[in-house]
Image: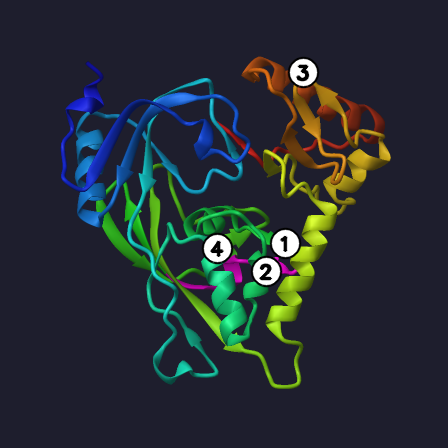
Amino acid sequence: MEITSIFKHPDVQFFPKADLTKYSTFEMSSFGDLYKIFSLEGLLSILEFLKRKNLSYFILGNGSNVIFPENFVIPVLKLCFKTELVHLHEKHLEEGETDWLNCNTLLNKLTAMAIKYNLLGWEAFTGIPATLGGAIYMNAGTSLGSIGPLVRSLKIYRKKSHSIEEYVPQKQDFAYRKNFILEEGDIFLQAKLQYKEASPDAPLQSKVIQNYLKFRNETQPMNQKSCGCLFKNPLNRPPAGKILEDLGLKGFEYKGFQLSQKHANYLVNNSSQVLTRENLRKFIQIIQGKVKQNLGINLELEVILL
């Protein structure tokens, strides 16, 4: 019997050797122990259990920038807390912050609120298929901005103390596609986001968001199995997609893995056969090698390989 299978809690559902393929937008075949958690009490209970057993764990958001191994030996915890559309402070002030939002809230729900209330800044995460917590963890963003500057307050589970901390992030807590807030095992639980209503003479956020979604659909493989950008944009260099396209790597394919024909930095699953981690590593090494050899640039992965 798996040691974690003896854990019981009414707000936690356990799925041993679950098919994790559908929990990643890249849909690479994977199996592992999955726990769906429906309350904070259930989460704290299983975290205490795992801590006693000295077991690590992985918190799963929307799976839009992760690739699981074929057999994932680490317990996967998926928060399934009830999420509601964001409530703004009383009388919808022109500037303020939201109430606490559960971090498993999908960003598309927040985008809907940006359109409804004409909120400035929230266009930054237009079209990103992530949860709020995952987006904050990666400081996700688009050419319109990043989510980090919008975060006013956080509730964080701290593994070392097995406690919940309320934290007010500072500017230096975020950088390009990373945060400096969490330590290993910590979890973003809730967040408050700042908002500012656009002035009457500013473009409607609905138009800004619709135009950007149109742009994304035209230039990115939104309807393919993808984990988004494979590499981070290097500092003081052209974007990774431009680098790869200029080297003739747009559409490059190796044993089912492909750089998109639409956007050279998007990794897509273009195979009906079983993809392997070994071939993925080889695919990445080939690309990084070509870029290093031709331009002397070391491309850093943006996708998380577990």
Please state which amino acid type lies under the numbered disc 3: Lys
SS of the residue at dot 3? loop
Q: CA distance from mark 4 to mark 2?
A: 11 Å
**Residue, disc 1:** 142
**Residue, disc 2:** 124
Please state which amino acid type lies under the numbered disc 2: Ala
Please state which amino acid type lies under the numbered disc 4: Leu
- Tell which circle, 4 or 2, labels the residue nearer the N-terminal end: 4
- Tell which circle, 3 or 4, labels the residue nearer the N-terminal end: 4
Left/right placement of residue 172 relative to residue 157 reads right
Q: CA distance from mark 3 to mark 2?
A: 34 Å
Please state which amino acid type lies under the numbered disc 1: Thr
User: Is residue 290 positioned above or below 181 on the image?
Assistant: above
Q: Is residue 199 magenta?
A: no
Q: CA distance from mark 3 to mark 1?
A: 30 Å
Q: CA distance from mark 4 to mark 1?
A: 13 Å
Q: Position of residue 217 (x, y in %)?
A: 69, 49
Span of residues in magenta? 144-153
Check whether the beta carbons of the residues at disc 4 and disc 2 lie within 8 A of each other.
no
Residue in the picture at 75% in, 40% down: 262
User: Is residue 93 positioned above or below 120 on the image?
Assistant: below
